[in-house]
Image: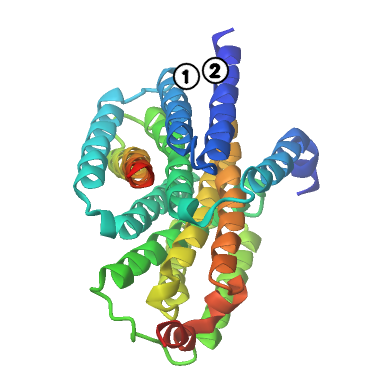
Amino acid sequence: MLEFLQNNLLMIYILTFAVFTGMEVISKVPTVLHTPLMSGANAISGVVIIGAILLIRQAQPDDYLVLILGFLGISLAMINVVGGYAVTDRMLDMFKKKKKS
Amino acid sequence: MWNLSIEYIYLISIILFIIGLKKLGHPETARKGNLIAAAGMGLAIIVTLFTPLEGASNNYLWVVAGMLVGSAIGFVAAKKVLMTKMPEMVSLFNGLGGACSMLIAIVELNNMGPEASLGNAQGLTTIFALFIGSISFTGSIIAYGKLDGFLRDTLVLPAPQFINTGLLLVIIAYSGYLMTLPVVDFNLTLILLALSLVYGVTFVTPIGGGDMPVVISLLNSFTGLGAAGAGLIYDNKVMVVGGILVGASGTILTILMCKAMNRSLINVVIGGFGSSAKAVG
C-alpha cells in the first residue's frame, strides 16, 4: 500500500485537485438549472465507456465472455453518453423557449 | 510521439469537461456548456479508439457494434421521452453508466486469473468500482421505477436504516476478507457483486418519491466515482479526472438540491418513508 502511494503520487495530486475543481465549478446554480446540470454531469460520467473500449481492444479475439460483456458495457455507456447529452440539450432548449415567451 | 499527443488530447477533453460544467451552471450559457462537454467526450472516445495498444487484437468490430447500438438506443430514447419524464430518463441513463463500471470490474476480476490476490491497490480499486457501479445500477433502476410509478412509493422495508447499515458493514467486512485471501476464487467476488446489487435496492427503496431527484443526483455522483475507480484500473487520466469531477460536482449539486427543498442530505437519505409523507402533506 505504501509503495502504491509512493508510485502514484502524481495521480493522488490529480485526484485531489479534481475534487476541488469539481466542487468549485458548481456554485450558485439557479434552481431551474438543477435538473439539466444533473443530466449534463450524468452524461460526463459516461466517460467510463473509455474503460470498456480499452477492455474490448485488449481482449483475446476468441474470448467470447469478455467480448460479450465488453460489448454490453460499451452499449450501456454509449446510451448514457449519447442519451445524456441529447436529453440535456432538449431540456435546455425548452428552457430557452420558455424564457422568451 | 503519438502516445504523448494522446495524453495531451485527453487533457483537452478534461478542460472541455470543466468549461462545459461551468457553463452549464449559468442560464445563458447552459446549452453551449452541454455541447462543449459533449465535444470533450467525443474527443476522448475517438482518441481511445486509435490509441496504440501493444499486442492488442483490437476487436474493432465489437467496439463499433457496441457504439452503434448504444448510440441508436440512447438517441431515440432521448428524442422520444416526454418532457415530464425527463428525471426518470436521467436516472435510467445513470444506472446504465453504473452498470458499465460494474461490468468492467467483473471482467477485470475474471481476468486476474485463479492465482491472483486482491490484497493490493489494483484489487482495492476493482472492488470499489464493482461496489459503487452495482449500487448506482440497481439504485437508479429503483429510482426510475418509483418516479415512473411502476414501483409503489409505499414499498418500504422494515427498519430500513438497520438493514442498510448492517448490509454496508457486511459488504465492507467481506471486501476486507477478500483482500486478505492469498488466492481469490472468481466466484467469491460474485458474492460481493450480489451483495452490492442488493444494497443499491435497499438504499433507495425507503426514500420517498418526492425526494427522488436528490437521490438521482447522489447516484449520479456515485457513477462518477465508479468511472474514476475503473479509470484507476487502466491508469487512464481522463476517466479518473472526469469521474472525480462528476463525483465532486454531483455531491455539491445534491447538497444544493437539498437546500432548495429546505432539507439536509442526511435527512433525505435516512428520512425514509416518513419524510415522503411529510412532503406530501
Which is more N-terminal, label 1 or label 2? 2
Image point (49%, 65%), residue name:
B214
According to the picture, the residue beneath numbered tag 2 turns out to be B6
Q: Amino acid at mark 2?
A: Ile
Classify mark 1: helix, strand or loop. Answer: loop
- What's the residue type where badge 1 is placed? Thr
What is the number of the mark on residue B41? none
Look at the numbered disc 2 and give the secondary structure of its residue.
helix
Which residue occupies 55% across, 87% down?
B162
At which x and y percent is residue B276? 44, 83
Distance (Cα) linking label 2 and label 1: 7 Å
Q: Are marks 2 and 1 in contact (CB under 8 Å)?
A: yes
Q: Position of residue A17 (x, y in %)?
A: 73, 40
Q: Residues within 10 Å of mark 2 (few under 14, many from 20)?
A: some
Considering every residue shown, the one lying at the far front of the view is: A101
Which chain letter matches label 2?
B
Q: Is residue B232 above or below residue A33?
A: above
- What residue did someone put label 1 on? B51
